[in-house]
Image (cartoon, grey):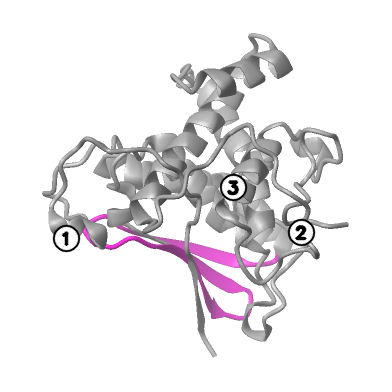
Amino acid sequence: MKTTFFILLSLLTGIAFAHEMPEHSRYQILVTDPTTSTVTEESFKSIPTIIHSLNHVNYHKEKISVSLNLMWDVPYFSAWVKDEAPKKYSLNFWGGIARIPGMNDNAHALTVCHEIGHLLGGEPRITIPSLLWATSEGQSDYYATSICLKNYFDLLDKMGKLEEPQVDQKLYTRCLTKYDETKDFLICLNIMEGIEGFSHLLYHLDSKKTKLDFNRKSGKAKATIVNSYPNPQCRVETLIAGNFCSPADYPCLGKENARPQCWFVD
């Protein structure tokens, strides 16, 4: 039986948008609608294509087949993995989600990596019977910034296309303190820009307009969360922790790069 797995993004923040949007933008953004998103049709298609191609060898190791469907003209907000058949999956992206105000190319790349994380992120997995193949939400977030985005930005660096983005000063300082002014520093900054853009996206979708703090630490969960999303603040902490985890050490166990106990309790 085919199972559709919708990845509902839930990083929430209190960022205000000055850009005037039409009323229907609460649930869809047309190609012709005004937006501050910097994702173009070209980057909407090229970024997932590159990241998908980078992971072909990993799909092969997992003995799975993965296809990619990019639907720029669809105005609604969704990105998901679909279980097509045993060991056969598809990655699906609607254009509306990339047109949300505040989105940027690195946030779009993070979205792609989160979806791939459901296939390659490892344990812990979802325990719902129809979704046993899927890595949990928290682990998919962690995988996205620990491994997937780093591989993508490393390729951009080799192509001479990795640039230094403007990010929140606190995030900039954390990257500089960890990596000094090296290629890893630039990769760290690009991941942080992706997290910031991702937050803008989720603010648009959040009816509560919940604020988040990039420096906050959430409390410890009673048990590891595998069948639902960690709370929004916890997800941000997970994405940032993954940024400081070396792919060679995944999953990391250090003080600043381990999976946060707000969702992962070992």
**Closer to the camera in the image, 8 or 120:** 8
> 102 above or below 206?
above
**Residue beneath disc 1:** 24
Relative side of 168 to 130, left or right: left
* Residue occupying the point 54% across, 57% down: 115
* Residue 59 in sight in this render: no
* Residue 108 in sight in this render: yes
Q: Secondary structure at mark 3?
A: helix
Region of the chain picked out in magenta, as a range: 63-90
Relative side of 106 to 170, left or right: left
* Magenta-drawn stretch contains 11: no
Give the mark, 1 or 3, whose residue is nearer the N terminus: 1
Q: What quarter of the picture does the C terminus occupy?
A: bottom right
Instruction: Give the prevailing secondary structure in the magenta stretch.
Output: strand
Give the mark, 2 or 3, whose residue is nearer the N terminus: 2
**Closer to the camera in the image, 223 or 153:** 223
Indicate the amino acid at tag 2. Ala
In front: label 2 or label 1: 2
Q: Secondary structure at mark 1?
A: helix
Mark linked to residue 233: 3
The percent position of residue 215, horizontal first and vertical second, equals 63, 31
**Residue beneath disc 2:** 221
The percent position of residue 214, horizontal first and vertical second, equals 58, 34
* Magenta-drawn stretch contains 82: yes
* Residue occupying the point 62% across, 55% down: 117
Check disc 3: other Cα within 10 Å, few if <14, some if 14-19, many if 20+. many
In this view, the residue farthest toward the top is 181
**Closer to the camera in the image, 158 or 184:** 184
The Cα–Cα distance between marks 2 and 3, rounded to whole angstroms, is 13 Å
